[in-house]
Amino acid sequence: MNSINGSLIIENNRSLTNLHGLNDLTTIGNKLWIDNNFILCDLTDLNNLDSIGGDIDIQQNDSLRNLIGLSSLDSVNGDIWIHYNSSLSSLAGLENLTFIGGELRITGCDSLTNYFGLSNLKTIGGNFDSFSNDHLKSFNGLDSLSSIGGKLLISYCDSLINFTGLENLHYLSGTFEIRSNDGLNNFIGLSKLESVGGNLEIYFNNALTSLIGLEKVTSIGGDLIIGAEWYGGNDMLLTLEGLENINSSTIEDLTITYNNSLSQCEIISICDYLLAPNGEILIHDNNTGCNSQLEVEYACAVDVSEINSKPEITIYPNPAKNDLFISSKTGIVINEVTIYNKLGQNVLQLNVKNNKVNISKVKQGIYFIILTSNKLKIRKKLVIK
C-alpha cells in the first residue's frame, strides 16, 4: 500500500509499540492522526511518507520520544498539532520540513527543552502556539524561521528565559501574545522582528524585568497591552524601554496596567501616542511615575523635552516669568495652550493672541505645556521662575 486517499487515524491502542506494515506508505490524502497510543515509541515505519494533504495531529502518546519517521516531509499544507506527549524530548524527524501552511501548535510536551529538528522551517502560514511546555528553555532549532502568517502565542512556558533561536524572524502577521511565563526575563532573540500585524500583548510574566529585544519593531497593527486586568501585570517590569521605536500612529488602544514596579513609561512612542491617540487609553495600577495618564504625560514633558522636532515650534523665554512667546519657522498658528503641573493637573488653559501668553498667575516650578493648532498638538517642557 503506497497511498491512502483519506485520513490515517491511529488511536486508543494500549499495546501498539510500532507502526510495522506502513513502510511503503508515501501519500496520505487528508489527515494523519496519531492519538492516545500509550506505549507507541517511534514513527520510524513512516519514513517513506512524503506527502500529507491535510493536518498532522500527534497527541497523548506517552512513550513517544521523537518524530523520527517523518523525515521525508518537506511541507505540510494543513496544521501540525503536537499535544501532551509527555516523553517527547526532541522534534528530530522534521529536519526537512520547510513550510507549514496552517498552524504549528506544540502544547503540554513537558520533556521538550528546545525546537531542534525544525532547523529548516522557514514559514508558518497560520498561528504558532507554544503553550504549557514547562521545560522549554529556548527557541533554538527555529533558526531559519522568518515569517509567521498568524499570531504568536507563548504561554505557561515557565523555564523560558528569552527568545533565543528566533533571530531570523522578521514578520509576524497576527497578534504577539506573551503571557504567564514565570521565568521570562527579556525579549532577546527577536533582533530582526520589524512588525507585528495585530496586538502586542505582554502580561502576567512574573520575572520579566525588561522589554529589551523589541527595539527593531516599528509598527503594530492593533492594541499595545502591557499588563491586563483579566490576567494581571508584569510584577518585575521596571521600564518600557525596548518599545521606543514603534510608530505611535500604528497603535490603536493603549493599555498599561497592573505592573507593580513599572515607573518609567515616558519613551518616545508612548509620549507621541499620548499627544495624538488613536483609541482608548488605560494607564493605572502601576508604580509612581506611570500610575496614570497624567503622570506619564508629565514625565514625557520633563524627560522627553523635544518630542516633536518638527514643525520647529519654539517657546521663549524658557525659563519664563510673566509672558511667554511662541514662534514657528513653518508658519503654523498656535490657537490654544494648556499648562500642566507635575501631578498632571491643568493649571492654565487659554487662547493665544499674537503668539503671546501671560503666565504671571502660574507659580514657580517645572511644567509641561501643550501647544494646540488646528492640525496637531506639541508638547514642551516649561520652567516658570
Image (cartoon, rainbow, N blue to C red):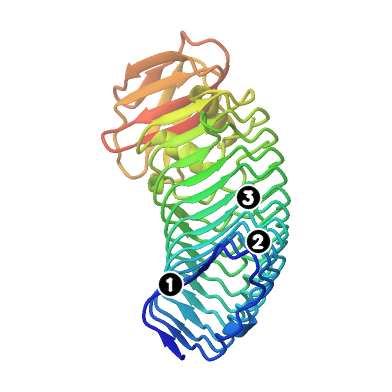
Spot the residue most to the front: 15
Q: Is residue 30 above or below residue 259?
A: below
Whether the residues at callouts 3 and 1 have beta carbons within 8 Å, the answer is no
Q: Nearer the viewer, mark 3 or mark 1?
A: 1
The 10 Å Cα crowd at callout 3, few under 14, some 14 to 19, many 20 or more, is many
Question: Please, what is the three-letter code of the amino acid marked with disc 2?
Answer: Gly
Q: Is residue 112 above or below residue 249?
A: below
Q: Which residue is mark 1?
A: 31
Residue at x 42%, y 42% (from the top left corner): 223
Q: Is residue 164 above or below residue 226?
A: below
Asked if residue 68 can be seen in this view, the reply is yes
Upstream in sequence: badge 2 or badge 1: 1
Asked if residue 314 can be seen in this view, the reply is no
Secondary structure category for the residue under label 1: loop
Upstream in sequence: badge 3 or badge 1: 1
Q: Which mark is residue 247?
A: none
Q: Which residue is mark 2?
A: 189
Whether the residues at callouts 2 and 1 have beta carbons within 8 Å, the answer is no
Report whether 154 appears left or right of 51.
right
Q: Which residue is mark 3?
A: 132
Q: Position of residue 366 (x, y in %)?
A: 58, 21
Residue at x 68%, y 42% (from the top left corner): 208
Q: Position of residue 88 (x, y in %)?
A: 69, 65
Q: CA distance from mark 3 to mark 1?
A: 25 Å
Question: Please, what is the three-letter code of the amino acid marked with disc 1?
Answer: Lys
The 10 Å Cα crowd at callout 2, few under 14, some 14 to 19, many 20 or more, is many
